[in-house]
Amino acid sequence: MVLLGHIPQEITQIDDICDFIGNISPGQKIHFKYNVYVGRFDLYKRFRRYMDGEDRKYTLENLNKIFKSFLLIKIDNDVKYYPILDASFMFFFKGVKVLCDTYQDEDFNEFLSKLEKYESLIYF
């Protein structure tokens, strides 16, 4: 077992975000402002999400920003943190798959194919 010592804050933050996205259930959407999941029958949460301007396009933009941040963090940090980052990515990837099924949108499918290309590089 390798002891990592102090884990940089940006790694723990991206890990938390990826875990949050990865734990989404089928049929749910994400309200990023409050970091909550919104189900089909959560009328108040759906209303708040709508009032905050969070729609399909906003969700996709946030997912893109998170992925770009993830890549920058991975480039800027030491190799010893790669296992943590790779595990975080797999949670993120799982959550994006669920969101693709929820939204059933071509833009989400394109984003998922971009993530699949990156996933194949991790295990190459």
Image: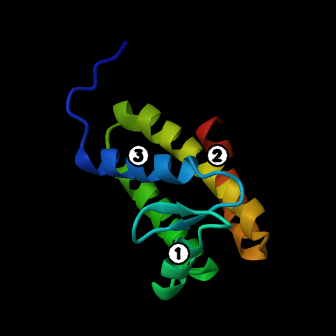
**At numbered mark 2, what does the secondary structure look like: helix, strand or loop?**
helix
- The reply to whether discs 2 and 1 touch (Cβ–Cβ < 8 Å) is no
| Of the two numbered discs 2 and 3 in the rendering, the one whose residue sits closer to the viewer | 3
Which residue is labeled 2 in the image?
119
| Of the two numbered discs 2 and 1 in the rendering, the one whose residue sits closer to the viewer | 1
**At numbered mark 1, what does the secondary structure look like: helix, strand or loop?**
helix
Q: What's the distance in space between the residues labelled 2 and 3, CA to CA? A: 16 Å
Q: Quadrant of the C terminus?
A: top right
Q: Residue at x 37, y 12 (%)?
A: 1
Residue 18 placement (x, y as % from top left): 48, 50
Which residue is labeled 3 in the image?
15
Q: Which mark is first along the chain, 1 or 3?
A: 3
Q: Which mark is residue 58?
A: none
- Front residue of 65 and 100: 100
Q: Residue at x 39, y 51 (%)?
A: 14
Residue 6 placement (x, y as % from top left): 20, 33
- The reply to whether discs 2 and 3 touch (Cβ–Cβ < 8 Å) is no
Give neighbour class at mark 1: few <14, some 14-19, many 20+ (Cα, 10 Å): few
- The reply to whether discs 3 and 1 touch (Cβ–Cβ < 8 Å) is no
In the rendered view, tell whether residue 62 sits above or below residue 90.
below
